[in-house]
Each structure stands twice: as structure tokens, then as C-alpha cells.
Amino acid sequence: MKTNKITALYCRISREDELIQESSSIETQKAYLSRYANSNKFYNIKYYIDDGYSGSNFDRPGFMELKKDIENQLVSAVITKDLSRLGRDYLTTGYYIEHYFPVNIMLDI
């Protein structure tokens, strides 16, 4: 996808996640997302990272910065390793996936 807008690569891990799955580390997520973005022609990537933050709420610095950039119309796509990285509250995560992102992110295709 060719655009001047940001492709947002969102990474999150909590301390509880770190104890359970080493494969979800921030560095692992960044490498995975970078490979995915490049192989699918998503350019102008920017990482939004919440290291050590629970997914049970969305009041996280990286996520708040992502929302600010979306609301300023700087973001063309949001990519995360899996939905649990976005959030653990399934109702709120669903709101972002089904309503917030589609309404606020306009793709330049």
C-alpha cells in the first residue's frame, strides 16, 4: 500500500504475559510485524508499544498515542500480532475493531 500515512504496528506485553509466553516479547512482536508489513507492502511504519501494561484496560501510553495519531488522520492501517495484544477486554477490543478503526481510518488506495 502506497501512502504517506503511518502504518501503525502495535505491540503490548504485560508482566503476566511475559511469564507465560516468551514468544510474545516486544522484540519478537516487532520483528514479526515488521516482516508482515514489508512482505505485504505496508510502508512508513511506526511502532506503538506498551511494555509492561495490562490488556485489561485501554488507558496505556502507546495505545493513547495511537488513538491521537488516528484522530489526527495520520494512520492508514493498524496491525498487531493478535487480538490479545490489542486488549484482553473482548467487548472493548471488539468496539475498536468493529467501530472505531473503520470509522476513523480512511485507506488511501
Image (cartoon, rainbow, N blue to C red):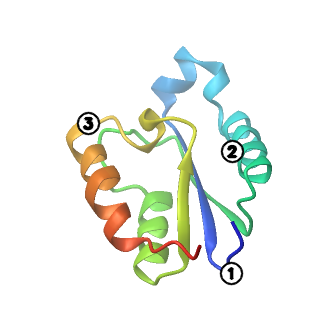
Q: Give the secondary structure at mark 1.
A: loop
- The mark nearer the N terminus, 1 or 3, is 1
User: Which residue carries the number 3 mark?
Assistant: 90
Q: CA distance from mark 1 to mark 3?
A: 32 Å
User: Which residue carries the number 2 mark?
Assistant: 33
Kindly report which numbered mark, 1 or 3, lies closer to the viewer in this rendering: 1
Q: CA distance from mark 3 to mark 2?
A: 22 Å
User: Which residue carries the number 1 mark?
Assistant: 4
Looking at the image, can residue 101 be seen? Answer: yes
Lateral position of residue 90 relative to residue 7, left or right? left
- Quick one: 35 or 107, which is closer to the camera? 107
- Quick one: 16 or 27, which is closer to the camera? 27
Q: Quadrant of the N terminus?
A: bottom right
Question: Residue 95's spot in the image, x, y percent?
Answer: 24, 52
Q: Please, what is the three-letter code of the amino acid marked with disc 3?
A: Tyr
Badge 3 density bin: few <14, some 14–19, many ≥20, Cα 10 Å: some
Badge 1 density bin: few <14, some 14–19, many ≥20, Cα 10 Å: few
Question: Residue 21's spot in the image, x, y percent?
Answer: 58, 18
Badge 2 density bin: few <14, some 14–19, many ≥20, Cα 10 Å: many
Lateral position of residue 11 relative to residue 60, left or right? right
* Label 1 with label 3: CB-CB less than 8 Å: no
